[in-house]
Image (cartoon, grey):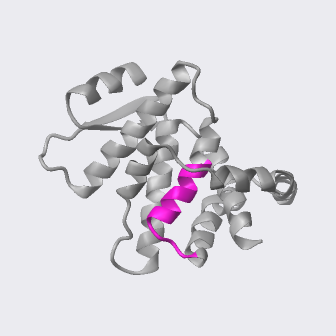
């Protein structure tokens, strides 16, 4: 994936989305309009950050796991879209509730996630407090709160997080656990 997309990205603005189901496939969009629309600019920037991270991972120089990176992304997206505390709570509750509603998490699963959260709370807080690198900061600067009701901002954050998770290859179950951790941080 890195070899294919990075080569195209050197030639023109490109964004990619790795789709995991029903089969492994790669969706690449070549953005040829000049100037790029805001959503295309965001997708190209997001893809560029992920390509840089994947290159570091290949070189053995990625200092955080993809899940840790996604956790930071989730917080930075919520900050970039300027979600209030209540909006963040709603975003993260929805981000893990689907697993409960589908029966993937039962009471024991929620209790286990809660125990894990308590054990990791200080490390999670410290991880989220670390500054981002300059490339990532440029990417987060592109995010803006959309006009409209709070639900519009929450949806923008949700979509941005989902796309970033997909590009990083962090699957829905792991993403839901990270949403749960952030939900707990915002409610306790």
Indicate whether 136 appears above or below 188: above
Give the image location of residue 160, x and y in percent: 44, 54
Give the image location of residue 53, x and y in percent: 49, 32
Indicate whether 139 appears above or below 88: above
Query: What residue lies at 60% left-to-right and 60% top-to-bottom?
Result: 95
Indicate whether 19 appears above or below 77: above
Give the image location of residue 42, x and y in percent: 33, 51
* Residue 55 inside the magenta-drawn segment: no
Q: Is residue 123 left or right of residue 21?
A: right
Q: Quadrant of the N terminus?
A: top left
Answer with the quarter of the image where residue 169 lies.
top right
The magenta span reads 71-84
Query: What residue lies at 74% left-to-right and 65% top-to-bottom?
Result: 184
Q: Nearer the viewer, residue 185 or 28?
A: 185
Indicate whether 7 appears above or below 33: above
Q: Nearer the viewer, residue 15 or 125?
A: 125
- Prevalent SS, magenta region: helix
């Amino acid at each position: 994936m890195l070899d294919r997309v990075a080569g195209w990205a050197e030639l023109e603005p490109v964004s990619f989305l790795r789709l995991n189901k029903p089969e492994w496939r790669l969706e690449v969009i070549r953005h040829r309009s000049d100037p790029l629309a805001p959503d295309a600019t965001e997708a190209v920037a997001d893809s560029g950050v992920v390509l840089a991270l994947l290159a570091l991972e290949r070189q053995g120089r990625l200092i955080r796991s993809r899940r840790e990176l996604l956790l930071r992304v989730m917080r930075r997206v919520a900050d970039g879209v300027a979600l209030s505390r209540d909006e963040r709570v709603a975003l993260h509750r929805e981000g893990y509730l689907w697993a409960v509603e589908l029966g993937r998490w039962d009471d024991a699963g929620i209790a286990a996630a809660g125990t894990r959260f308590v054990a990791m709370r200080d490390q999670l807080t410290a991880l989220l407090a670390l500054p981002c690198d300059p490339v990532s900061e440029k990417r987060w600067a592109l995010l803006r709160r959309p006009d409209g009701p709070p639900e519009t901002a929450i949806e923008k954050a949700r979509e941005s997080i989902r796309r970033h998770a997909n590009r990083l290859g962090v699957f829905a179950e792991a993403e839901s656990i990270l949403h749960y951790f952030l939900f707990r941080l915002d409610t306790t």
